[in-house]
Image: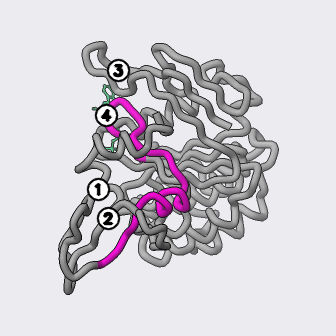
Amino acid sequence: MIQLNDISFWYQRNKMVLSKMTMQLEAGKIYGLLGENGVGKTTFLRIVAGLLFPKSGDIDVMGFKPEKRTPSFLSDIFYLPEEFDSPHEKVNEYAKLNGGFYPAFNAAQFQSNLELFGISGNQRFTEMSYGQKKKALISYALATNTSLLLLDEPTNGLDIPSKGIFRRLVSQAADESKCIIISTHQVRDLELIIDPIVILEPNQVLLNDSVEAITRKLKFSIEPTVPEGALYYEPTMGGYNVVSINTEGVESKLNIELLFNAVISNRAHFRTLYTQAK
Ligand SMILES: Nc1ncnc2c1ncn2[C@@H]1O[C@H](COP(=O)(O)OP(=O)(O)OP(=O)(O)O)[C@@H](O)[C@H]1O
């Protein structure tokens, strides 16, 4: 669905953000896009959405070149940024005005999403809190039913029950024809729904793998002492949270936060382990 070949991008010539990045993302998945602050997650999403243009390399999104911003491309992709200006309209007016641009927009689904989040469609965006606006825009984004949905830090500002509703709505929205990419630092909010996991490092993709493939390669366990050969460990109640190579082929439950810390503190090793992501 998305193919990037040797994409490079910088805002200032002396400060490369993406350097010859090659990556493939498929339909039917909810990708979790992770990376330290400033590594380029938003930049990546904006390039895919056609809002920023690569300086070199090729990008294909659903058969389109995003930078051409053709109506058929724009009507099948939705990008929800982390920061947004408040629309002037009431929530329902906004959806009525803009929903027509998306052929698969479902007004009933929009109302049902709003209801689940407890948001009134008669409210003006300008009179809503940040979290309320976010819930209204998430409701709208999901109701556009675009093939590609890009969500930048969607759970920021959501209260605890709303995070659960968000997970439920995103899981329901996902199907074989859609690709959803969620950039987040709140991995615990999304641990249950994101798969594959993509981790960016400065300029590059460090890991792009399914949860199944990650847990085939790596073992996540709690041990009383740090085992020899552990890739990464953190103290926890009564022992250590440990990431090690899964030499015995045991099944373990992926701990994304632990994986992230393991990858970031051990980049060279993971680059070798995940050479296919390059
Ligand atoms: N408009 C801009 N002009 C110049 N540099 C920019 C601009 N936007 C972002 N950058 C720089 O590009 C790099 C990548 O920024 P980006 O916002 O994509 O990172 P991010 O991974 O989304 O970060 P965060 O997790 O903090 O949101 C950063 O070093 C940032 O300082």
Counting residues from the start of the chain, the first of labels 1 and 3 encountered is 3
Crowding at dot 4, Cα within 10 Å, few <14 / some 14-19 / many 20+, comes out as some
Q: Position of residue 227 (x, y in %)?
A: 23, 70
- Number of the label disc, if any, that sits on residue 53: none
Q: Which residue is mark 3?
A: 11
Q: Is mark 3 within 8 Å of ligand 1?
A: yes
Q: Please say which color scheme the image uses.
A: one colour
Quick check: marks 2 and 1 in contact, CB under 8 Å?
A: yes
Q: Which residue is mark 2?
A: 243
Q: How many marks?
A: 4
Compute the Cα span from label 4 to label 1: 16 Å
Q: Position of residue 185 (x, y in %)?
A: 36, 56
Tell me which amino acid carries mark 1.
Answer: Ala
Q: Which residue is mark 4?
A: 202
Residues in magenta, as a range:
199-222
Q: Horizontally, is 56 left or right of 97 in the view?
A: left
Q: Quadrant of residue 64?
A: top right
Query: Residue visible at 26% across and 79% down?
Result: 223
Q: Secondary structure at mark 4?
A: loop
Give the quarter of the figure containing the N terminus: top right
The answer to which of 233 and 171 lies nearer the viewer is 233
